[in-house]
């Protein structure tokens, strides 16, 4: 079963708009929640990550919001740019060395 | 630093053939991982290693084998290839447990016909 559920599968946003991708997890032992960005033909690369002791983390135009009680976290991309067009994966891991990934969201930012 | 390198980039196998996917990292990372990526399914962990001589199964290990004789290398072996193993395979490494950034290689696209 999918331990990390990600939505939407695809997202189209106009340049300058806000992109929002949501993830939900089941395992309360998860204590590290990264987001990875993947461009076509490339491997994923870490974008931003959060631990459950904070509710929000911001790095430039990218923000993770984390709701521990709801077991949900989301990625917000402010002022989205065509260069942000990529596939985004949320993930979660615990102390057992096992990282679980969401199914991915294909983001298209239209100029 | 080259980071994580994988060979080959592409490969077509016939059903029943075997092959080894190579992965090398030059960052002196202790942890290494093999994932497969299928369309719409995200990445699934096949095997991982926490150091030379130590390997463990991930979420989808059936049909695969690994070894870790050095810190740098973590090959993935496919025995008796099946169409269900058609996928893109990514190797990754990190300094310690998975909450350290994982660095991914460029991937190997494998087709089993």
Image (cartoon, coloured by chain):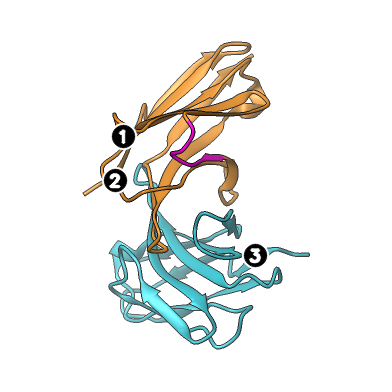
Chain colours: A orange, B cyan
For residue A71, the mark is: 1
> Picture coordinates of residue B32 (x, y %)?
53, 69
Within 10 Å of disc 2 (Cα), the crowding (few <14, some 14-19, many 20+) is: few
Specify whether residue A82 is painted magenta: no
- Asked whether disc 1 touches disc 2, contact meaning CB atoms under 8 Å apart, the reply is yes
Tell me the residue at 57%/56% (across/down).
B100
Task: Tell me the residue that label 2 is attached to.
Answer: A28
Would residue A14 appear left or right of B59 to someone viewing this image? right
Magenta residues (range): A49-54
Quarter of the image where one finds residue B103: bottom right
Quarter of the image where one finds residue B17: bottom left
> Picture coordinates of residue B54 (x, y %)?
46, 82
Quarter of the image where one finds residue B77: bottom left
- The quadrant the C terminus of chain B occupies is bottom left
Point out the tag, 1 or 2, that comes first from the N-terminus.
2
Would residue A109 appear left or right of B60 to someone viewing this image? right
Would residue B56 appear left or right of B84 to someone viewing this image? right
Task: Tell me the residue that label 3 is attached to.
Answer: B4
3 vs 2, front mark: 2
- The quadrant the N terminus of chain B occupies is bottom right
- The chain containing the residue under callout 3 comes to B
Tell me the residue at 43%/26% (across/down).
A21
**Gap in angstroms between the C-alphas marked 3 and 1:** 33 Å
Q: Callout 2: helix, strand or loop?
A: loop
């Amino acid at each position: 079963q999918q331990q990390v559920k990600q939505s939407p599968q695809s997202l189209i946003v106009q340049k300058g708009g806000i992109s929002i991708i949501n993830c939900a997890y089941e395992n309360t032992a998860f204590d590290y929640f990264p987001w990875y960005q993947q461009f076509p033909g490339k491997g994923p690369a870490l974008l931003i990550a959060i631990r459950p002791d904070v509710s929000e983390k911001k790095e430039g135009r990218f923000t993770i919001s984390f709701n521990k009680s709801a077991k949900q976290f989301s990625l917000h991309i402010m002022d989205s740019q065509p260069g942000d067009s990529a596939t985004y994966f949320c993930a979660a891991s615990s102390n057992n060395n096992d990282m679980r990934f969401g199914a991915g969201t294909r983001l298209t930012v239209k100029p | 630093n080259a980071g994580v390198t994988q060979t080959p980039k592409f490969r077509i196998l016939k059903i029943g053939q075997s092959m080894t996917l190579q992965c090398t990292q030059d960052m002196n990372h202790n942890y290494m991982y093999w994932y497969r990526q299928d369309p719409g399914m995200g990445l699934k962990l096949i095997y991982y290693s926490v150091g030379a001589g130590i390997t463990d199964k991930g979420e989808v290990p059936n049909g695969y084998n690994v070894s870790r004789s050095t810190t740098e290398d973590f090959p993935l072996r496919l025995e008796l290839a099946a169409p269900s193993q058609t996928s893109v395979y990514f190797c990754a490494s990190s300094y310690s447990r998975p909450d350290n950034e994982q660095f991914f290689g460029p991937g190997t696209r494998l087709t089993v016909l």
